[in-house]
Image (cartoon, grey):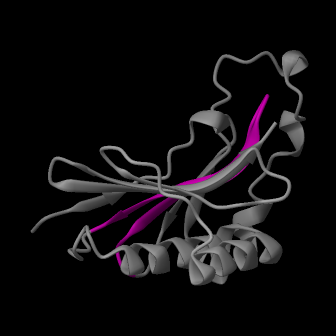
Amino acid sequence: MRVLLLIFLTTPLLIYGQDEEECIFDQATQTDEFVKSVSEFSNYTWNNESKEATVILPSNETLIAQRGGCYHFGISGTLVTNDRTDFDNLDYWFEKSLWIAERLFSENDFRTLKKSIEQKTYTMPEGNSTYILFPHEYYSEFSMTLKKNGNKVELYIGYYFA
């Protein structure tokens, strides 16, 4: 069975090694509140250092959701699944991204993403992976990346701002 790994890259969210006094964003206010309210995420553990929730989903998938930042602030996650759907089926990966966004993002950000997908107002720069930028009025970057990594697939959906 081929395991697909859907990863939401969280480089802008990493806070390891940061002195809290140097951070622009208050680390103490970055809690698990954003996953507590999602009934599907009732089975999770919270890592306060990395501001990361590991959620065991009923489908035996794992979602790692992150919220926070030091110099940049954003929300993203990692979905690990046994899903075998075709890598080139971009509509399918958009649906997966929307499912995650609907649960992790604000209602307004979810609607913005959905509208951009429906109206195809995103951009797709050329490269070795599918990299899609969604327009957003306030965020430094709102994007989705889909790439093959061996027999796995990495899917990122997230945003951050500075």
Per the rendered image, the range of residues in magenta is 59-81
Residue 45 belongs to magenta span: no
Front residue of 149 and 15: 149
Residue 8 spot, x, y in % from top left? 49, 52
Front residue of 29 and 108: 108
Could you tell me which quadrant the C terminus lies in?
Answer: top right
Q: Which residue occupies 39% across, 48% down?
A: 126
Residue 41 spot, x, y in % from top left? 59, 73
Drawn side of residue 46 relative to residue 156, left or right: right
**Snapshot quadrant of residue 58:** bottom left
- Say if 10 sits above or below 70 in the image: below
**Snapshot quadrant of residue 5:** bottom left
- Say if 45 sits above or below 101 in the image: above
Drawn side of residue 110 relative to residue 45, left or right: right
Residue 65 visible somewhere in the drawing = no
Q: Which residue occupies 68% across, 43% down?
A: 51
Q: Which residue occupies 66% across, 16% down?
A: 17
Could you tell me which quadrant the N terminus lies in?
Answer: bottom left
Drawn side of residue 4 relative to residue 16, left or right: left
- Say if 4 sits above or below 11 in the image: below
Which residue sits furthest left?
A: 1
Residue 69 belongs to magenta span: yes
Residue 40 spot, x, y in % from top left? 58, 81
**Snapshot quadrant of residue 110:** bottom right
Residue 95 spot, x, y in % from top left? 47, 80
Residue 145 visible somewhere in the drawing = yes
State the predominant SS element of the stretch in magenta. Answer: strand
